[in-house]
Image (cartoon, rainbow, N blue to C red):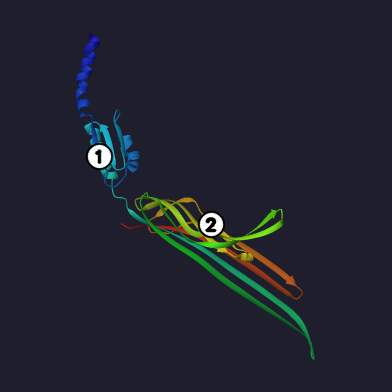
């Protein structure tokens, strides 16, 4: 008898809470369900639930908890800022050559020694600037290039002997990047993967040069951020009889990123 009385009292005391629990449908204005759920789910009270799809949330909770969730959504469901992501890829080279020689010439007044020295220096640069517009938290990608014809030779061994087959294949060569910027005030964190490809004919043979970086960096809006770079050098020296020569070459690559806010 006492147990039945206690259960009845508990049921009566719980009626107001049960009456307040209900289902509310909330339409998002600027964000998607996937973007807001990680921040909203911890606010749902025990026994409540939240789910949704696209831009609609389904919240089952008490009236007080639903009001708390809507206050949080008012701060989260805002229009994402538009951003302009720019990547600059520099590819520079410096080549220098020094050569000289000497000889002895006989004349009426005796032997005359004569020597010559000359040097040359050349510089080249290839800069690629690319920009793409996206929003805070949105993934952006851009790639610009062209298809280059490359001659391919293949040796085929068959019953009739060795046959040299030649054909032309096309290879896509270009530059671009994939970026995911995320704002925190005036600071931006970017997951980025830039890639640059170019055709090289060093040594008389065509080859594809490729450089790629995968990294996450952070910096202020409107400022250039150096992602990385590479460099290599080569040298050659030779001498023959009365002549000598030296050749040096340096190649440098640098990649930089900049994110600007458009609103």
Q: Residue at x 69, y 76 (%)?
A: 100
**Dot 1: element:** strand
**Which corner quadrant of the image does residue 202 belong to?**
bottom right
Instruction: Choose between 107 and 51: the one closer to the eye.
Output: 51
Looking at the picture, does residue 70 appear above or below residue 167? Answer: above
- Percent coordinates x, y for residue 85 in the rendering: 40, 57
Could one spot residue 230 in this view of the protein?
A: no
**In the rendering, which numbered label is found on residue 26?**
1
Q: Which residue is drawn at 26% across and 37% down?
A: 69
Q: Residue at x 67, y 70 (%)?
A: 246
Q: In this view, does 143 lie to the left or right of 7?
A: right
Instruction: Choose between 147 and 141: the one closer to the eye.
Output: 147
Looking at the picture, does residue 156 appear above or below residue 250? Answer: above
Quadrant the C terminus occupies: bottom left
Q: Is residue 142 left or right of residue 31?
A: right
Q: Is residue 38 left or right of residue 26?
A: right
- Percent coordinates x, y for residue 46 in the rendering: 30, 28
**Dot 2 surroundings within 10 Å: few (below 14), some, or many (20 or more)?**
some
Quick check: marks 1 and 2 in contact, CB under 8 Å?
no
CA distance for labels 1 and 2: 47 Å
The residue identified by callout 2 is 211
- Percent coordinates x, y for residue 63 in the rendering: 22, 32
Looking at the picture, does residue 102 appear above or below residue 173? Answer: below
**Which corner quadrant of the image does residue 38 belong to?**
top left
Q: In this view, does 220 lie to the left or right of 113?
A: left
* Lower sequence index among marks 1 and 2: 1
**Dot 1 surroundings within 10 Å: few (below 14), some, or many (20 or more)?**
some
């Amino acid at each position: 008898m006492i147990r039945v009385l206690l259960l009845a009292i508990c049921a009566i005391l719980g009626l107001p809470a049960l009456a307040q629990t209900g289902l509310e449908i909330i339409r998002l204005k600027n964000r998607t369900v996937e973007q807001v759920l990680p921040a909203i789910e911890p606010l749902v009270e025990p026994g409540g639930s939240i789910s949704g799809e696209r831009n609609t949330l389904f919240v089952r909770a008490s009236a007080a908890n639903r009001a708390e969730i809507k206050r949080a959504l008012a701060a989260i469901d805002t229009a994402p800022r538009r951003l302009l992501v720019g990547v600059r890829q520099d590819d520079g080279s410096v080549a220098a050559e020094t050569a000289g020689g000497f000889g002895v010439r006989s004349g009426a007044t005796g032997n005359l020694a004569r020597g010559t020295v000359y040097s040359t220096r050349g510089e080249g640069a290839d800069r690629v600037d690319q920009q793409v517009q996206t929003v805070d938290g949105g993934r952006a990608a851009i790639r610009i290039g062209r298809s280059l014809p490359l001659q391919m030779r293949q040796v085929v061994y068959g019953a009739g002997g060795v046959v040299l087959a030649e054909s032309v294949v096309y290879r896509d060569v270009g530059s671009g990047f994939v970026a995911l910027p995320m704002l925190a005030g005036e600071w931006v964190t970017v997951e980025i993967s830039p890639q640059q490809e170019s055709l090289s004919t060093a040594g008389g043979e065509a080859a594809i040069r490729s450089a790629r970086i995968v990294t996450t960096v952070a910096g202020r809006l409107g400022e250039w951020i150096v992602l990385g770079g590479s460099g290599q050098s080569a040298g050659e020296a030779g001498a023959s009889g009365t002549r000598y020569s030296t050749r040096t070459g340096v190649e440098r690559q640098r990649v930089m990123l900049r994110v600007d806010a458009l609103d």
